[in-house]
Amino acid sequence: MGEAKRRQTALGDKYGQEETILPWLPISKRQAETFYQWTTRGAWIGIGIMAALWVTVRFIGPTFGWWDIQ
């Protein structure tokens, strides 16, 4: 319990609050991690859509006669 009291007196009002990434940027580390997870998921979804579109344009479309590759 001594360590917690020392930390509380050292931090003062900021004790128990989440740390920010930078002192001048009001974004907590948890918010940054959540943002990172969302953008990574979105990037993989975009890669999957792009691959499906490429397969459609390159193989499926010409197979069904929708267009010709020249």
Image: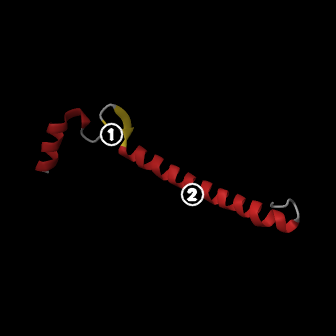
Q: Is residue 21 above or below residue 48?
A: above
Q: Amino acid at mark 2?
A: Trp
**Secondary-structure class at tag 1:** strand
Q: Position of residue 37 (x, y in %)?
A: 48, 52
Q: Residue furthest front?
A: 70
Q: Residue furthest bottom?
A: 63
Q: Quadrant of residue 55 in the image?
A: bottom right
User: Is 30 or 46 nearer to us in this picture?
Assistant: 46
Q: Residue at x 30, y 41 (%)?
A: 19
Q: Amino acid at mark 1?
A: Thr
**Secondary-structure class at tag 2:** helix
Q: Earlier in the sequence, mark 2 or mark 1?
A: 1
Q: Position of residue 52 (x, y in %)?
A: 69, 61
Which residue carries the number 2 mark?
44
How far apart, in angstroms, are the residues tagged by discs 2 and 1? 27 Å
Q: Residue at x 70, y 60 (%)?
A: 54
Q: Quadrant of residue 28 in the image?
A: top left
Q: Residues within 10 Å of mark 1 (few under 14, many from 20)?
A: some
Q: Is residue 22 above or below residue 34?
A: above
User: Is 9 or 33 nearer to us in this picture?
Assistant: 33
User: Is 7 or 30 nearer to us in this picture?
Assistant: 30
Q: Position of residue 70 (x, y in %)?
A: 81, 60
- Label number found at residue 70: none
Q: Residue at x 25, y 36 (%)?
A: 14
Which residue carries the number 1 mark?
20
Q: Residue at x 19, y 34 (%)?
A: 12
